[in-house]
Image: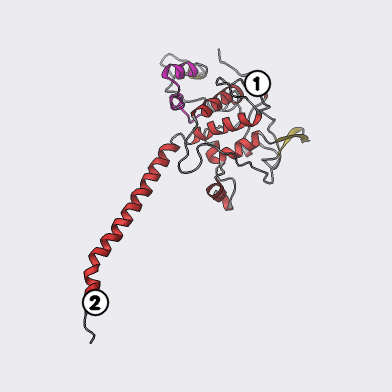
Amino acid sequence: MKKTFILSAATAVTLAAGSAFAAGTGGHVTDYAFSFEGPFGSYDQDQLQRGLQVYTEICSGCHGLQYVPFRALEDLGYTDAEVRAYAENFFVPDTGPEALPGDERPAIPTDYFPGSALSNAPDLSLMAKARAGFHGPAGTGISQLVNGMGGAEYIASVLAGYTGEEQEQAGVILYENEAYGGYFAMSQPLWGDDVVYADGTEATLEQQAQDVAAFLMWAAEPKLEARKTAGITAVLFLGLLTVLLYLSNKKLWAPVKHRKENAPAE
């Protein structure tokens, strides 16, 4: 029987603007200090595990991670046995030779997270990456480059940005959100103490918002640390190469320059 999360269904996280019925005008986004920011930043494994717990207990009933394989959770510090046990909580289409249309089976590590259960619930696999350029001219992400703000800050700010104000439009209840900058059709999913963290961390509203935002950043950029390492290595190599080329150029052309300087005037 498929495992369901009642709380998830009641308070689905609808982060995409496409699910909103009222467009925002651009609100306040908090510049949270995530460990993975900057050229030398790296993921906080404990935070990612807490974010996975928030996703599992709050978000997964409606929202999917269809581009994330279960086996990738080993990067979060889980063992193969723990990943297998976790994957069995989800069901995926059974494509076996004896399977009938519509049959499902418990997931295994090589499977991917299921997609979203609701048509208006966006998949969260690339959400943090998609929102990374939410400010700056023409979505260029200039503010992210200069201020270190990106999709994770936006997601955390939205989750913690509800004012409690509501309004009804065309029979639909809309909820005001400071980070979104207006009203949209996403009821408040996090309230504080929604989960009991396995590591004993106090599950405040902002803590949960930052943890799940960090997890979604990892889901969108699982190889972020490797890319940073490769980038820093390339920059250092190019810098060293530039110095060597400059010195080589000076050495090769020094005799020619010296002859020109000592040549008799005509």
- Residue 123 pos. (x, y %): 56, 32
> How far apart are the alpha carbons under marks 2 and 1?
83 Å
Which residue lies most toward the bottom here? 266
* Front in this rendered view, residue 120 or 54: 54
Amino acid type, mark 1: Leu
In contact (CB < 8 Å): disc 2 and disc 1: no
Q: Is residue 266 above or below residue 146?
A: below
**Rendered residue at 68%/36% (across/down):** 161
- Image quadrant in which the C terminus is located: bottom left
Q: Label 2 crowding class (10 Å Cα cut-off): few <14, some 14-19, many 20+?
A: few
Judge by depth and name the residue closer to the eye, 241 or 171.
Answer: 241
Q: Principal SS element in the magenta part?
A: helix
Residue 93 at what x, y percent from top left? 49, 20
Q: Write the residue at 49% across / 28% down.
A: 45
Please name the residue that numbered disc 1 is placed on.
7
Q: Is residue 255 above or below residue 75?
A: below
Q: Nearer the viewer, residue 153 or 105?
A: 153
Q: Which residues are magenta?
A: 66-87
The amino acid at mark 2 is: Lys
Relative image position of residue 177 (x, y in whole percent): 70, 38
Q: Which residue is mark 2?
A: 260
Apparent side of residue 110 relative to residue 124 in the rendered image (left or right) = left
Location of residue 112 with respect to 103 vertically, above or below: below
Quarter of image, res 6: top right
Considering the image in quadrants, where does the N terminus appear? top right
Which residue does the image show at 57% across and 33% down from the upper left? 213
